[in-house]
Image: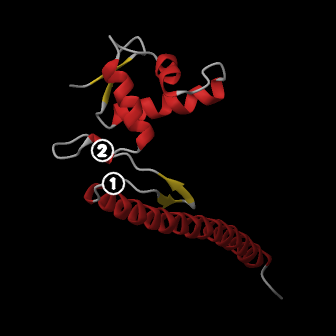
């Protein structure tokens, strides 16, 4: 006859091992998913890094593919990087900011470059370009939200 106490211990241990197996299987699935995400991130980083290197070495900017979309990379303002390396619409924005009597709002730039400023959906992309030019060192943004050229 089997010892009931021993049988109970075996059953309890089997339940513990089943629970442990389930937890480890879940952790393994999470690790594999994260590893897959890291592989994708690594490929994207390599692609974008290569595109940035090409963009900096090129005289004229050209659209690049990022995540299946054509995007224009805006170079940072550095010695030797000319304004002519910017896309034409960014060059027009810089000209407007430079020719203004003082700092300008996005609406004023929009009027000057022909954007329908009465439609917010058309003004916001322009504001994004202005901010991108600030981030790359081509313009300066004042605390009140106006933009001015860097000399």
Q: Quadrant of residue 67?
A: bottom right
At which x and y percent is residue 127?
A: 50, 27
At which x and y percent is residue 115?
A: 57, 27
Residue receiving disc 2? 84
Marks 2 and 1 close (CB-CB < 8 Å)? yes
Q: Vertical placement of 145 versus 83: above or below?
A: above
Q: Vertical placement of 85 versus 131: above or below?
A: below
117 vs 142, nearest the viewer? 117
At which x and y percent is residue 133?
A: 37, 34
Q: Residue at x 28, y 34 (%)?
A: 137
At which x and y percent is residue 97?
A: 36, 22
Instruction: Report whether 129 appears left or right of 80.
Output: right
Q: Residue at x 62, y 69 (%)?
A: 29
Residue receiving disc 1? 60
Q: Residue at x 55, y 33 (%)?
A: 125
Classify the position of the C terminus by image quarter.
top left
């Amino acid at each position: 006859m089997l010892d009931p106490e021993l049988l109970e211990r075996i059953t309890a241990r089997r339940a513990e091992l089943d629970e442990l197996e389930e937890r480890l299987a879940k952790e393994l699935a999470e690790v594999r998913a994260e590893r897959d995400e890291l592989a994708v991130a690594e490929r994207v980083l390599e692609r974008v890094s290569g595109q940035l290197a090409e963009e900096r070495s090129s005289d004229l900017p050209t659209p690049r593919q990022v995540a299946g979309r054509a995007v224009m990379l805006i170079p940072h303002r550095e010695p030797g990087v000319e304004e002519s390396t910017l896309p034409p619409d960014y060059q027009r924005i810089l000209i407007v900011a430079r020719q203004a009597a003082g700092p300008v709002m996005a609406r004023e730039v929009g009027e000057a470059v022909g954007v329908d400023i009465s439609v917010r959906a058309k003004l916001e992309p322009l504001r994004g370009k202005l901010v991108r030019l600030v981030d790359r060192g081509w313009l300066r943004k004042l605390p009140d939200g106006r933009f001015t050229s860097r000399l």
